């Protein structure tokens, strides 16, 4: 068996995008390249449920760069932000807001605690202006209830900023349906491309409210102005732009609903089989279709991750921090099949047995 990647991103890529990686691309300040950027803006806007392709800004940086750019452009020291903090990525928004001296409070969740209406109640009518949420908190797999968050933001006249990096193209997502003012996505997750390009999609309301960021590289207005001609202010990740074009075409040829359903089917297939094999999947909070966490009481999860990698060339995500030795995550995005899942589970069970035996010998 060849290498199998069940990582949240970069993922196991599709043949067409792998081929594109090997190509040289000609100069990009051209109409030919502009047409690729226009295609991407139009295609991604449609997939995001944003009717304004001109409101999409393309950055050459990882997802965190786009999170920081959004903090710089979309809130000021006059704002009061609220962050849903359910893990590594929620904490990252808190850290960025702190760095940029924006006053904020956070709804702090334990790793296995479901976000409910009760958590939001104390923050109603308290003058918050902006809500930040990582809709799928990738560190645990929790998918928050977008309708609940959207209603909360509307009731409180708050701007709604969503890091959708690990839910876009894994679960349903629709900016206009839920009144989302800014969405952050990144090339290496649901889009299944190489890392390097991140996109921020704005509502018209947010576009009007952009302020001057402290760093000039992040200035949203420069990106908006350049996008009118299908360009970016600085050299973009040219190859990734071609990969995105290819993936948007593939998703549209497949049909978005079919695409999402394939991922959902893989998630359900993995979860059912894993449970049948006696593995524990946390059930105290709703999961994104993008990944499944697997929890262990009596064995170091890191050892399993390492054994799968070293012995079988199979890659799954460890968890960070306190969860590190208790849990790992298996991604369902990317070019993997149910046969690949069978193979993973087979090697997973063998590895668990072997690690348990080793610990008995000692
Ligand atoms: C992957 C991810 C990011 C971006 O991380 P980078 O390493 O900066 O690309 C941000 N938010 C969430 C929810 C993610 O899953």
Image (cartoon, rainbow, N blue to C red):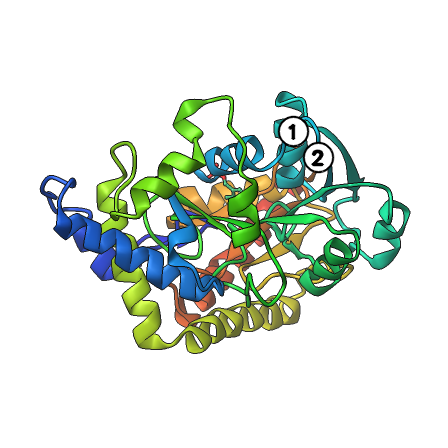
The reply, left or right, for residue 352 in relation to residue 314 is: right
The reply, left or right, for residue 54 in relation to residue 179 is: left
Closer to the camera, 196 or 282? 196
The reply, left or right, for residue 297 in relation to residue 233 is: right
Q: Position of residue 349 (x, y in %)?
A: 55, 59
Q: Position of residue 131 (x, y in %)?
A: 70, 45
**Mark 2 touches mark 1? (CB < 8 Å):** no
Q: Is residue 197 visible?
A: no
**Residue 242: image tag:** none
Q: Quadrant of the N terminus?
A: bottom left
Q: Residue at x 54, y 57 (%)?
A: 167
Q: Quadrant of the C terminus?
A: top right
**Residue 322: image tag:** 2
Closer to the camera, 121 or 278? 121
Mark 1, Cα crowd under 10 Å, few <14 / some 14-19 / many 20+, is many
Res. 25 image quadrant: top left
Q: How many marks?
A: 2
Name the residue tied to disc 1.
97
Label 2 vs label 1, nearer the camera:
1
Closer to the camera, 149 or 285? 149
SS state under label 1: helix
Closer to the camera, 23 or 124? 124
Q: Is residue 145 visible?
A: yes
Label 2 – label 1 distance at C-alpha: 24 Å
Mark closer to the chain start, 2 or 1: 1
Residue 337 lies, with reference to residue 21, above or below; the image says: below
Q: Residue at x 83, y 51 (%)?
A: 120
Q: Residue at x 25, y 47 (%)?
A: 229
Q: Position of residue 286 (x, y in %)?
A: 70, 62
SS state under label 2: helix
Q: Residue at x 42, y 73 (%)?
A: 256
């Amino acid at each position: 068996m060849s290498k199998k990647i069940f990582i949240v991103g970069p993922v196991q890529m599709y043949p067409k995008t792998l081929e594109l990686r090997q190509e040289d691309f000609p100069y990009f300040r051209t109409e030919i390249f502009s047409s690729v950027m226009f295609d991407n803006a139009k295609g991604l806007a449609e997939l995001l449920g944003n009717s304004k392709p001109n409101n999409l800004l393309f950055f050459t940086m990882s997802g965190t760069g786009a999170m920081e750019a959004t903090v710089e452009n979309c809130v000021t020291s006059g704002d009061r932000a609220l962050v849903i903090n359910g893990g590594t990525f929620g904490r990252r928004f808190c850290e960025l807001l702190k760095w940029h001296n924006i006053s904020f409070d956070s709804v702090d969740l334990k790793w296995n605690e479901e976000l409910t209406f009760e958590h939001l109640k104390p923050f109603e009518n308290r003058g918050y202006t902006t809500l930040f949420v990582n809709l799928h908190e990738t560190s645990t797999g929790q998918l928050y209830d977008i309708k609940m968050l959207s209603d909360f933001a509307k009731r409180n006249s708050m701007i709604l900023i969503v890091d959708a990096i690990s839910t876009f193209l894994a679960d349903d997502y629709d900016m206009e349906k839920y009144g989302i003012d800014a969405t952050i996505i990144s090339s290496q997750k649901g889009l299944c491309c190489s890392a390097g390009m991140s996109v921020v999609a704005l509502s018209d309301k947010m576009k009007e409210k952009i302020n001057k960021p402290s760093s000039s590289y992040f200035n949203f207005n420069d990106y908006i102005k350049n996008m009118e001609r299908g360009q970016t202010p600085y050299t973009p990740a040219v190859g990734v732009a071609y990969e995105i074009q290819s993936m948007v075409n593939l998703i549209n040829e497949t049909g978005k609903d079919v695409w999402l359903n394939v991922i959902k089917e893989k998630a359900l297939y993995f979860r059912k089989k894993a449970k049948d094999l006696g593995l524990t999947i946390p059930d105290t909070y709703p999961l994104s279709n993008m990944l499944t966490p697997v929890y262990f009481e009596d064995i170091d999860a890191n050892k399993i991750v390492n054994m799968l990698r070293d012995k079988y060339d199979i890659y799954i995500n460890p968890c960070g921090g306190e969860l590190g030795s208790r849990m790992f995550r298996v991604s369902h995005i990317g070019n993997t099949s149910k046969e690949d899942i069978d193979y993973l589970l087979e090697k997973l069970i063998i590895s668990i047995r072997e690690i348990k035996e080793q610990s008995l010998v000692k």
